[in-house]
Image (cartoon, coloured by chain):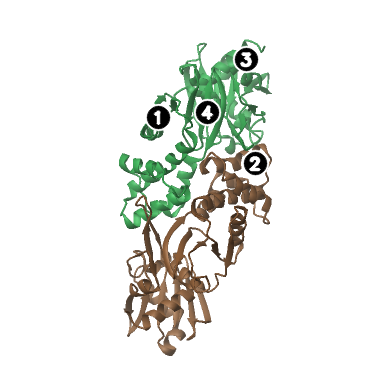
Chain colours: A green, B brown
Amino acid sequence: MIAIDWGTTSFRAYLLDDGGRILERREAAMGVMAISSGGFADVIDSQLPEWIDARRPRIVMSGMIGSRQGWKEVPYVRVPAGLTEIAAAMQEIGWGSRRKAWIVPGLATEDAAGVPDVMRGEETQLLGIMEPIDGGRCTVCLPGTHSKWAALAGGRILSFSTHMTGETFALLRKHSILGRTMTDGDDDDTAFDTGVERARDKGGLLHHIFGVRARTLIDNLGGNAAREYLSGVLIGHELLAAAGDDSPVHVVGTHGLARRYRRALEAMGRTVAVVDADGAATRGIFRLAQVREAGLP
Amino acid sequence: MIAIDWGTTSFRAYLLDDGGRILERREAAMGVMAISSGGFADVIDSQLPEWIDARRPRIVMSGMIGSRQGWKEVPYVRVPAGLTEIAAAMQEIGWGSRRKAWIVPGLATEDAAGVPDVMRGEETQLLGIMEPIDGGRCTVCLPGTHSKWAALAGGRILSFSTHMTGETFALLRKHSILGRTMTDGDDDDTAFDTGVERARDKGGLLHHIFGVRARTLIDNLGGNAAREYLSGVLIGHELLAAAGDDSPVHVVGTHGLARRYRRALEAMGRTVAVVDADGAATRGIFRLAQVREAGLP
């Protein structure tokens, strides 16, 4: 089968064998935002011709391709939801000469105050990492531009929340007065840890981030340390709001960001496991295809 | 005398009469960042020739002109500080044929956790509004790109804190995924109020701002309402962190931002007075010049 993770900025396709193992992968900067409406089928036809022609494999796509700006809007599934509900809500789309693909729905929830939250794409990663994780209740963190926190139990996603930590960091780094004096260098754990601790103080996030500027002027905080300190302040605020009770946290990812989250969580006395993110989305898509092929209940 | 409010992006000069009233004003996009080092004297000579030649008036400048990137770095005065301490720390600079000016220092403080905070320019506004305000302890808010909150008593600035609310709003409006679907329209008090209330909920600021996106997708929140809601979320978070105890709050400004702050504070049950900001900085500079001319103790 072919699993496609089709997000806002990139198109990632994987050819999987019958056991779900990745045989080949292909990536292009042809995210949903770069493709005009009606052009999605052309992307598949032109990017993956040999994969498709060979055996007319099953194609399952997840991510923004199922959004209003994507190929076809597939309604969000409300949590709690697991493999079965998500597979049942997948929608088929056809094109050309008997070509077809399934699109995975995103998930929606609302918090105690009635404010909604959404994900599209991350649900396949959550499904992909569920098997290796203990079946009991646990907390999963997918750090990134829009970090997702999910509570899982018994193979289902119970609830989740999104935190714009990565995007806020990037905005402050690139476009704010704070970024002007920052530099990109090696990790500076001391500066990062100080930022994480800072998040516990009174004053709020909007004050704490100005502290990066004030410390640059008064404490002569260097440009690299300032960047690391800001990262710590933002991640610290996210953790205080999102990490919830004291259940173990599974941080998904192998890159430096997962290391940062682990470090900050451990400083808060939390038990952390870093879960290998490689292939999580394709494993989730593979599981969904299996359930769908087995027939809906 | 001539009062100059010389900030990062603009140069604002005021010719004052002997009672501190504004006779003439002149403004140019010649902020500190736009002038190469050594070019500051030329700006004054070329922008204000008739003012200067006429009577060789006293010139007092405040703002980023006294920063490391300005004409001459004038060290911060630590709070608590009032007219006397600030006037005493003004530094003189000379150029050309017996021309000279004073530069007002900024203020520095640190919070209970030892993290510093700074202001340059706002101290003259605070000094300028002190006289009309009751001599008792009060809280003053200068809303803006970097909102300043100050506790005043007995004609002195006791403490202050900075919140990057305006800059964060501008970054999210211009450069984030939230801004893409926003529009600029009329004030929408309902949406704004909902955002202010949202700030009280659990989840933290980084989660609450993603809610703007989720509400756009799920609740069909419109582009103008989304902008107003985001404004409310950010201002709400600032107020919860900064507005402190229940003393009356004096919000400085006559523009729409002061109205927003008043509205949000009143929704929190606070007593609010909006103080006319027009001329606050020049009044503060005039008072500093008077004290300095009277001779230091």
Nearest to viewer (mark 2 / mark 4): 4
Instruction: Report whether mark 2 lies on the same chain as mark 4.
Output: no
User: Which sits earlier in the primary sequence, circle 4 or circle 1?
Assistant: 4
State the SS at label 3.
helix
Q: Residues within 10 Å of mark 1 (few under 14, many from 20)?
A: some
* C-alpha separation, residue under disc 4 versus residue under disc 1: 16 Å
Query: Farthest residue in the front direction?
Result: B136
Q: Nearer the viewer, residue B18 or B177?
A: B18
Residue that carries the numbered disc 3 in the rendered image: A292
Structural distance between the alpha carbons of marks 2 and 3? 31 Å
Task: Please report contact status of discs 4 and 3: CB closer than 8 Å, yes or no.
Answer: no
The chain that hosts pointer 2 is B
Q: Amino acid at mark 1?
A: Arg
SS of the residue under disc 1: loop
Label 2 with label 4: CB-CB less than 8 Å? no
- The residue beneath circle 2 is B216
Residue under pointer 1: A270
Where does residue B72 sit, x and y in percent of width and height? 33, 70
Q: Nearer the viewer, residue A240 or B206?
A: A240
Q: Is residue B94 left or right of residue A73?
A: left
Labelled pair 2, 1 in contact (Cβ < 8 Å):
no
Counting from the top left corner in percent of width and height, residue B14 is at 49, 78
Name the quarter where the N terminus of chain A is drawn.
Answer: top right
Q: Real-space Cα distance between discs 2 and 4?
A: 21 Å
Compared with B214, A96 (above or below) is above
* Protein chain holding label 3: A
- Residue under pointer 4: A150
Residue B196 on image: x %, y %: 60, 49
Quarter of the rendering occupied by the C terminus of chain A? top right
Q: Residue at x 54, y 69 (%)?
A: B277
